[in-house]
Image (tube, grey):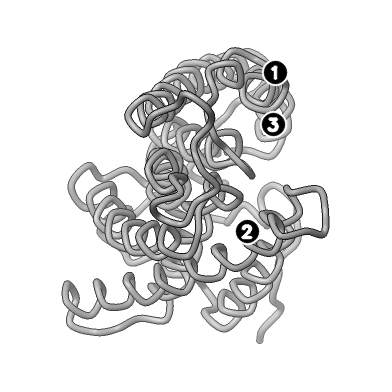
Amino acid sequence: MRFPAMLWFTALWITLVYLPVCHWVWGGGWLAEMGVLDFAGGLVVHLTAGVAALTAAIMLGPRDGFPGRLMPPHNLTLSVMGAGMLWVGWFGFNAGSAVAANGDAGMAMLVTHISAAVASLTWMISDWVYFGKPKVLGIITGMVAGLGSITPASGFVGPIGAIVIGLSAGFVCFIVTNAVKQKFRIDDSLDVFAVHGIGGALGTILCGIFVAETFGGAGLGAGVTMGSQLTTQVIGVLAVLVWTGVLTAVVIKLVGFFTPVRADADEELAGLDTSQHHETGYHIR
């Protein structure tokens, strides 16, 4: 995506997709009235981002050479450093959603850490079994899957729920990541749909189960059964998925009226840092 198109896309997408979903879930909208549970953004942040990424990747098409040419991160050391910052920062993201320094914030921080750790190990083992080697990139990708998946449930579930959500995220997101790229050949370069979209949806749905006091959760509301809460969570996932997919496609089409969206072949060959910004991150001779 060309830089001017990205700026137009960002402004329109926030207005037409993100803000309405924020209102639905956190602003007293119809999903809030239904009782949907999303503590820190499984629906509002991760599912919207994941579905938007998938829609954009399909509409823009793959990069030149995909999927035949390997396109790993250019610097794994920097990736690991960033992952460490992200892991620590996520404590503020989830625990901070309690808007207080209390037991809710403490439990949110604990379950966030558990889910990330379990998911990273699960992804590593999945890599080991599937590809024959454990990978550092798999560890940090699994970590992000665990963080995204626990986000909607972080203020509602206990350690048992966090373990199950982390295991599920590491395994399910691993499968979807490989399916998207290998089976469907969609060039989602950062696996945003598989990790954030699927992870956010998975955590939102599982929250409807593990919020129950039986599993150490915060407990269901008065007159609410596990079945009814689970149904509410699924409705929330489906509503946000459809809204985001349709409106993201509309936004990309609208942006196309203002400016070319996709970088042309020469711009892509030169690299977007060079063609869009006339600068590069490394000057190596």
Depth check, front residue: 151 or 229? 229
Question: On screen, 7 above or below 121?
Answer: above
Numbered mark located on residue 46 in the image = none
Q: CA distance from mark 2 to mark 1?
A: 22 Å
Quadrant in the picture for residue 137 = bottom left
Q: CA distance from mark 3 to mark 1?
A: 25 Å
Q: Nearer the viewer, mark 2 or mark 3?
A: 2
Quadrant housing the N terminus = top right
Numbered mark located on residue 28 in the image = 1
Quadrant housing the C terminus = bottom right
Where residue 236 sits: x, y (%)?
Answer: 46, 24
* Residue carrying label 2: 108
* Residue carrying label 3: 10
Left or right: 250, with 104 as reference point: left
Question: On screen, 13 above or below 174?
Answer: above
- At x 59% / y 13%, what residue is drawn? 30
Type of residue at label 3? Thr
Disc 2: CA contacts within 10 A as few (<14), some (14-19) or many (>=20): many
Quadrant in the picture for residue 281 = bottom right
Q: Nearer the viewer, mark 3 or mark 1?
A: 1
Left or right: 255, with 117 as reference point: right
Question: On screen, 214 above or below 13?
Answer: below
Disc 1: CA contacts within 10 A as few (<14), some (14-19) or many (>=20): few
